[in-house]
């Protein structure tokens, strides 16, 4: 379950490379109106239906809550796709915009949840962020770490 939670947070941020490749392929060949779904849990978590199913199970959402949350997830997906298609933005700007979209959607989802669900949702979000930051540290964090000082030889 933790792996799925992590993929939810990372799917938007890590999908830039895949999305850029898809966008380049789209310009060279005509794609159908709805692209075939990608396989694997990481790609499925970008799907609003899969996200809703996961949240429903994890937070025990009511049918009314599901009805309110689904359009939020669909809107998030549309906004993120628009950001990915905007070739005028730098990678860093895209990442910032996607993060902002995620945070906005998170706030809207929390408004639909009861207090117990909010606590669970916040804990899920916190675990995803921790895993994301640990992954970033392993990928490129060597510059920020101080190097051990060597003792002068006598």
Image: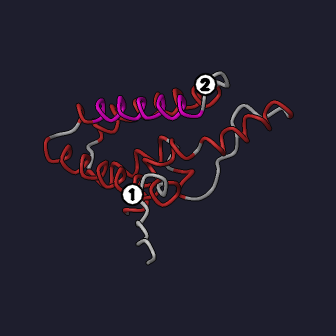
Which quadrant would residue 30 be assigned to in this image? top right
Disc 2 crowd, CA 10 A, few/some/many (<14, 14-19, 20+) = few
Near-viewer residue (37 or 67): 37
Q: Position of residue 72 (x, y in %)?
A: 40, 30
Which residue lies under the disc numbered 2?
89
Q: Position of residue 50 (x, y in %)?
A: 47, 48
The residue furthest right is: 28
Near-viewer residue (110 or 69): 110
Does the magenta segment cover residue 96? yes
Disc 1 crowd, CA 10 A, few/some/many (<14, 14-19, 20+) = some
In this view, 146 is above or below 92: below
Q: Position of residue 86 (x, y in %)?
A: 63, 24
Quarter of the image for the C terminus: give it: bottom left
In this view, 83 is above or below 12: above
Which residue lies under the disc numbered 1?
131
The span picked out in magenta is: 91-109
The residue furthest front is: 154
The secondary structure type at the circle numbered 2 is loop
Q: Are marks 1 and 2 in contact (CB under 8 Å)?
A: no
Which tag, 1 or 2, sits closer to the chain's start?
Answer: 2
Quarter of the image for the N terminus: give it: bottom left
Which quadrant would residue 19 be assigned to in this image? top right
Q: Looking at the magenta stretch, what is its main secondary structure?
A: helix
The residue furthest bottom is: 154
């Amino acid at each position: 379950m933790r792996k799925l939670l992590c993929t939810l947070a990372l799917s938007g941020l890590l999908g830039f490379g895949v999305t850029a490749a898809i966008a380049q392929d789209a310009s060279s060949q005509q794609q159908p109106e709805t692209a075939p779904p990608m396989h694997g849990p990481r790609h499925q978590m970008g799907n609003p239906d899969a996200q809703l199913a996961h949240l429903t199970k994890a937070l025990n959402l009511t049918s009314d809550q599901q009805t309110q949350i689904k359009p939020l997830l669909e809107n998030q997906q549309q906004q993120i796709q628009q950001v990915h298609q905007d070739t005028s933005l730098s990678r860093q700007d895209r990442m910032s915009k996607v993060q902002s979209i995620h945070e906005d959607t998170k706030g809207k989802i929390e408004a639909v949840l009861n207090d117990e669900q909010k606590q669970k949702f916040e804990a899920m979000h916190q675990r995803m962020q921790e895993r994301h930051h640990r992954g970033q540290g392993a990928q490129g964090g060597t510059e920020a770490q101080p190097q051990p000082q060597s003792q002068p030889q006598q």
